[in-house]
Image: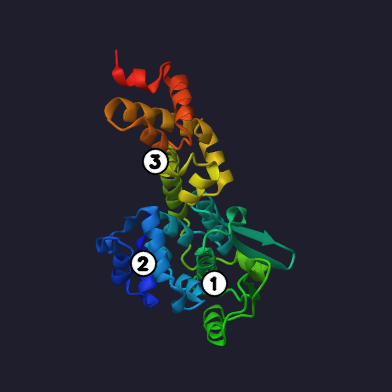
Amino acid sequence: MNVPRGLFVALAEGGADLEADVRAAGIDPRVLKEREAVIERHAYERFLDVVLDPLRGASVGVRVGARLRLELFGTLGLVMLSAPTYQAALARCARYKALLSDLRVDVERGVTNATIEVSTFGGRTDDPHAPARIEAEIGLFVQVGRRLVAPAVRFICVHLRRPAPSHQAKAEFAEVLRCPIRFASERDALVLASVDLDRPLLSADPEAYPLLAACAERRLDADERELVGRVRRAAESLLPEGAPALTDVASHLHVAPRTLQRRLREQGTSFTALLEHTRKELARHYVGNTELDLIDVSYLLGFSHLNSFRRAFRRWNGMTPAAYRLGP
């Protein structure tokens, strides 16, 4: 997965010893110098385990979010900076989050007040880092609203799902958010006056915004085209654990299952078809080009029984694995 340099900068400014943390996660420290690091998913999760260690405090998410700099997040960050209004910047963020991660941003505008809610698609509960990632988004929206909006947004309150933390952690949350905080809420959300959504950004650039937005859309289109390959690679890596479900691969790619399903449909395929094709091609490779025992091949392809693999192979190729291995 791609990790922008802006995240590393914010973590370092928050007091993290990044070189030690990436080494502890088994990652080459040279990634810290890259504009956008490409890190294998499990290695990135190990890194989060280290850097978001509970000893760093419950407020680590909002503290990191408050230090994030959009200008260090490439085109996607720059297009938000150049947006005409706070709401336009939020809308861009919501679109990119929906396409590139398992987080979603929903802005609900009422007559008097508005809410900016951050959540995981489907309300995932299996990600131990989700609270910190959600709260980092909230910290980001707060600092953008105060630093880049004119006049600065005055948030009415913040709702956080997490239970009330220690007195020290409460003080840390208060220092960053600077408005009433309601812990143990039913959602993670910012509340503000609806009119604040229309306030202009100090960094708004009416000439650059459409150009940057078009550039961002091209990048998203490229990501969509690469999606099929990423799904197949994810499925291949998960097969030894058993045939993966759509939800397994979506989790592996940090994408909401429904979003992944929709994006594949837009590419003219489906998860079922890709999984079948991946197993078929791997079966031909293992049987035709290796000396692996068929039981081992069956395991690598996620079949629970050798006979199930044999039946699938015959369906795919019109002959048994043994006959295919012997060749013409």
Q: Quadrant of residue 207?
A: bottom left
Mark closer to the chain start, 1 or 2: 2
Q: Are marks 1 and 2 in contact (CB under 8 Å)?
A: no
Q: Amino acid at mark 2?
A: Phe
Q: Amino acid at mark 3?
A: Arg
Other residues around mark 2 within 10 Å, as few (<14) / some (14–19) / many (≥20): many
The foreground one among 284 and 153 is: 284
The residue pinned by badge 1 equals 142
Lateral position of residue 143 relative to residue 115, left or right: left
Q: Cα distance, mark 1 to mark 2?
A: 19 Å
Q: Cα distance, mark 2 to mark 3?
A: 27 Å
Is 315 rendered above or below residue 133? above
Q: Quadrant of the C terminus?
A: top left
Q: Residue at x 36, y 75 (%)?
A: 16
Q: Is residue 160 something one can see in this rendering?
A: yes
Q: Residue at x 51, y 77 (%)?
A: 59
The residue pinned by badge 2 equals 8
The foreground one among 98 and 27 is: 27
User: In the rendering, at what x and y percent does residue 33 appear?
Assistant: 27, 63
Q: Is residue 270 something one can see in this rendering?
A: no
User: In the rendering, at what x and y percent does residue 78 appear?
Assistant: 42, 59
Mark closer to the chain start, 2 or 3: 2
Q: Residue at x 56, y 78 (%)?
A: 177
Q: Are marks 2 and 3 in contact (CB under 8 Å)?
A: no
Lateral position of residue 288 relative to residue 223, left or right: left
Q: Amino acid at mark 1?
A: Val
